[in-house]
Image (cartoon, rainbow, N blue to C red):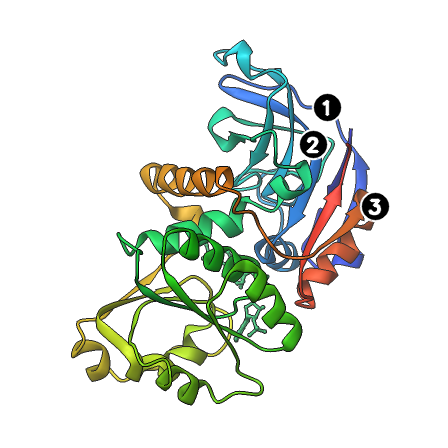
């Protein structure tokens, strides 16, 4: 089969190429998926640029994707044959990710795809929606809560807006351009603060209500700004190490009994993963989908797709493999 692979870490245009590799067969408890789309996330790009392949002579990249189960391994129900699915954590602790014509993967890492959702949309679900769902789960009841989401036009940020709104929250978000503001609006944000043209502190002050939950893409940048506007027992969830390191005054956090949570989606335990998946599936069945514009690339163009993500271009980069 054809697969994108790299043998050493480095710049995308130097290390990524399409290889002919043996077609995989599913092992015990695994399914084989005929891949339709494979989405690129920042983690795929970071890993390729710094991490030598650890699970064999080469690494097939990408965690997220979509396709159809075309073979099942021992111990897997025949009923899964022909099932349309989305895939999560496809390249986690393995050498074989989704940027290939087939992937063999544990049956619990594929999730059935409702008929109304396209394979393209399905490839966008994995990391961003599960990350957003887990971040929001820190607050048990979001109904009527005031939620601040930084970077609301990012893959995770926009997913967090849509999911928080779906759960009944009032959503405030920050963006850095008018184009990104439109994306955040489509995702459903109630208040959009373009921090390039508006004073963020003044905009938060003018909301007239304190923030119950923050989902933060750049805690070192933003926390000092929203610190005065945290509600009693506010929770802050940080999912990215982008931007400056966090330095903060303790007292404003302590005096509202605030809490800060950090997490990485790959280290969630099984019950957290199941909760994130059920939140995402419920939202999908209610018509809440990933909202970002998509740029489609071929397998042969994977290096350009990685560059698209590296350059922080607005939108998602997805490889079309078949379908
Ligand atoms: N912990 C986890 O499990 C987990 C899961 C998924 C992603 N991540 C990480 O989270 C980050 C975002 O992922 P993504 O897929 O949402 O990326 P993305 O689609 O490229 O979006 C990133 C958004 O975040 C904002 N942003 C990025 N860096 C920033 C900085 N230094 N200061 C302020 N704002 C910044 C930008 O918004 P504005 O330009 O509008 O400000 C941008 O639109 C990546 O670093 C990724 O590796 C972590």
Closest to the camera, between mark 1 and mark 2, is 2
Asked where in the image residue 227 lies, by quadrant, the reply is bottom left
Dot 2: few (<14), some (14–19), or many (≥20) neighbours within 10 Å? many
Residue under pointer 1: 23
Q: Earlier in the sequence, mark 2 or mark 3?
A: 2
Q: Can I make out residue 264 in this image?
A: no
Q: Does 239 appear above or below 181?
A: above
In this rendering, is residue 298 above or below 33? below
Cβ atoms under marks 1 and 2 closer than 8 Å: no
| Disc nearest the viewer among 3 and 1 | 3
Comes first in the chain, label 3 or label 1: 1
Q: Secondary structure at mark 2?
A: strand
Quarter of the view holding residue 231: bottom left
Q: Position of residue 57 (x, y in %)?
A: 67, 40
Pointer 2 and pointer 3: residues touching (CB < 8 Å)? no
Check disc 2 and report the residue beneath it.
35
Q: Nearer the viewer, residue 252 or 16?
A: 252
Ligand 1 within 8 Å of the CB at mark 3: no
User: In percent of the image, x 52 and y 87: which residue is there?
Assistant: 198
* Pointer 3 residue: 300
Other-residue count near label 1 (Cα within 10 Å), few / some / many at <14 / 14–19 / ≥20: some
Dot in front, 2 or 3:
2
Q: Quadrant of ligand 1?
A: bottom right
**How far across and down, in percent of the image, does residue 221 sit?**
45, 80
Give residue 72's position: percent from left, percent from top: 58, 15
Answer above or below: position of 253 versus 279: below
Q: In the structure shown, which secondary structural element does the residue marked by tag 3 occupy? A: helix
Kindly tell me whether residue 222 is visible in this rendering.
Answer: yes
In terms of depth relative to the viewer, which is nearer, 211 or 303? 211
């Amino acid at each position: 089969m054809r697969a994108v692979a790299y043998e050493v870490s480095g710049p995308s245009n130097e290390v990524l190429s399409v290889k002919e590799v043996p077609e995989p067969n599913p092992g015990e408890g695994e399914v084989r998926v005929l891949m339709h789309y494979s989405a690129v996330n920042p983690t795929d790009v970071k890993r390729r640029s710094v991490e030598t392949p650890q699970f064999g002579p080469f690494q097939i990249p990408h965690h997220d994707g979509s396709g159809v189960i075309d073979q099942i391994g021992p111990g897997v129900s025949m009923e899964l044959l022909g099932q349309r699915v989305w895939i999560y954590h496809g390249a986690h602790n393995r050498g074989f990710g989704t940027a290939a014509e087939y992937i063999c993967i544990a049956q619990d890492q594929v999730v059935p795809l409702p008929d109304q959702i396209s394979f393209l949309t399905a490839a966008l679900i994995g990391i961003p929606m599960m990350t957003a769902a887990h971040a929001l789960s820190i607050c048990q009841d979001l109904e009527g809560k005031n939620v601040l989401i930084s970077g609301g036009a990012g893959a995770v940020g926009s997913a967090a807006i849509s999911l928080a709104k779906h759960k009944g929250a009032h959503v405030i978000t920050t963006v850095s351009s008018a184009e990104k503001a439109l994306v955040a609006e489509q995702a459903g944000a109630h208040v959009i603060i373009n921090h390039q043209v508006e004073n963020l502190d003044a905009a938060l002050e003018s909301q007239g209500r304190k923030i119950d939950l923050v989902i933060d893409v750049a805690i070192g940048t933003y926390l000092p700004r929203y610190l005065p506007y945290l509600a009693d027992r506010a929770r802050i969830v940080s999912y990215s190490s982008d931007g400056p390191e966090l330095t903060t005054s303790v007292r404003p956090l302590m005096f509202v009994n605030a809490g800060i949570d950090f997490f990485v989606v790959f280290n969630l335990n099984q019950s957290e993963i199941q909760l994130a998946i059920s939140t995402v599936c419920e939202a999908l069945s209610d018509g809440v989908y990933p909202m970002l514009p998509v740029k489609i690339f071929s397998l042969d163009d994977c290096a350009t797709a990685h560059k698209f993500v590296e350059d922080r271009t607005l939108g998602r980069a997805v490889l079309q493999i078949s379908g």
